[in-house]
Image (cartoon, rainbow, N blue to C red):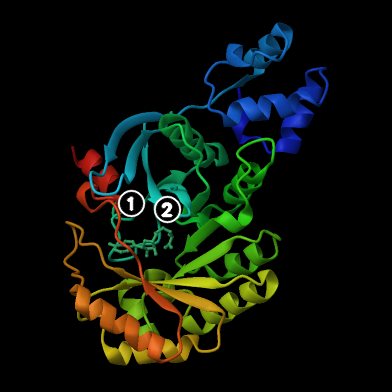
Amino acid sequence: MIDLKDLEYPELCDFIESLGEKKFHAKQIFSWLSKGIEDFDEMTDISKELREKLKEKSHISKLKVRKKLVSQIDKTTKYLFGLEDGNYIESVVMYYNHGITICVSSQVGCLMGCRFCASTIGGKVRNLTSSEILNQIIFAEKDLGERISNIVIMGIGEPLDNFENIVKFLHNVNNPNGLNIGYRHISLSTCGIVPKIYELAKQNLPITLSVSLHAPNNKIRDSIMPINSKYKIEELIPACKDYIKATNRRISFEYALISGINDSFENADELSKLLSKMLCHVNLIPVNNIEERDYKSGNKQQIHAFCKRLIKNGINATVRRELGRDINASCGQLRRKNEKG
Ligand code: SAH
């Protein structure tokens, strides 16, 4: 059975034609699917005959909301979704002045092994299909009754380790017949899989690239991010520069401040040198303490002092606003708790 939402729009057109029907029905079907209908009989503007043909050869994939937490402070909403094979993923919806942003997962678990991250502790189970990535947005929009305007691919998983499905997802989520979310409203975050950054730059998708840097040199990065033993900072930075050149987009560097590891003024100065003259922005995040690890974030003053130091050195930097503090909103933690029972 074909998962209809897993077809790219042109593939859906071909599929409809293969059923002996006119291509233009793809537009209606794609639009219904994006609205989150769960039954073919809800497609009221297509013939019963076509609906029966669809039922025979295809199905509409679903997510089950297993848990939903809403912050009393800022309305941040976190979903634990059950997939059809019994696995779990998380998505988080955040309310900003400029619109509603969703943070989506790209894999069940993660292979990358970053020492401070909860999503990677049980390893990678599997890639998400493009339809499972899309469904997180479709289901949140339907549940909240609101339009989501921005997407960050920053939930569980490493998106560039699931490249093909991510690109397919990006094409579908951008399609005007469906969710119609502009590429400029989408960010993809990677731990730095260098060859895939070059490949992404060639896709002609003007999305924002976020790179989880978290360290100003190889010594520190090696100690917290295993990917750095494969792709050193000397390879990562040129890949980022290539991305900027190809897309003309500013890169965002994520930097989680971990007390005593990467948060000294010396670290800030070294980071400034590394990023000098690049079209970029540094996003400082106080590291989230996770039960399984003993990394601690510094206090607010230290974080702001680090930020000021970068700015003084001519680097664009901000401290990320913390949302959903009362619901443990950072990704990976709910799935872990759920699996541990
Ligand atoms: N694999 C991708 C995207 C998922 S992680 C990546 O590495 O970018 C999303 C972001 O959360 C990354 O910047 C990651 O480094 C960061 N992160 C993970 N665990 C964290 C923690 N405990 N505290 C703060 N940030 C964390």
Residue 183 on image: x %, y %: 62, 55
Q: Nearer the viewer, residue 311 or 32?
A: 311
The residue drawn where x is 28% and y is 55% is 118
Hey, which quadrant is residue 200 in on the image? bottom right
**Mark 1 lies on residue:** 331
Residue 251 on image: x %, y %: 54, 72
Left or right placement of residue 125 versus residue 239 in this view: left
Number of residues whose C-alpha sits closer than 10 Å to that of mark 2, classed few (under 14), some (14–19) or many (20 or more): many
Q: Marks 2/1: CA distance?
A: 10 Å
Left or right placement of residue 186 versus residue 48 in this view: left
**Mark 2 lies on residue:** 157
Label 2 CB, ligand 1: below 8 Å? yes
Left or right placement of residue 293 versus residue 11 in this view: left
For numbered disc 1, what is the local secondary structure? loop
Ligand 1 image-quadrant field: bottom left
Which disc is residue 107 wearing?
none
Q: Which amino acid does label 1 sit on?
A: Cys
- Of the 4 image quadrants, the one containing the N terminus is top right
Left or right placement of residue 280 versus residue 258 in this view: right
Residue 292 on image: x %, y %: 18, 58
Compare marks 2 and 1 and give the one earlier in the sequence.
2
Number of residues whose C-alpha sits closer than 10 Å to that of mark 1, classed few (under 14), some (14–19) or many (20 or more): many
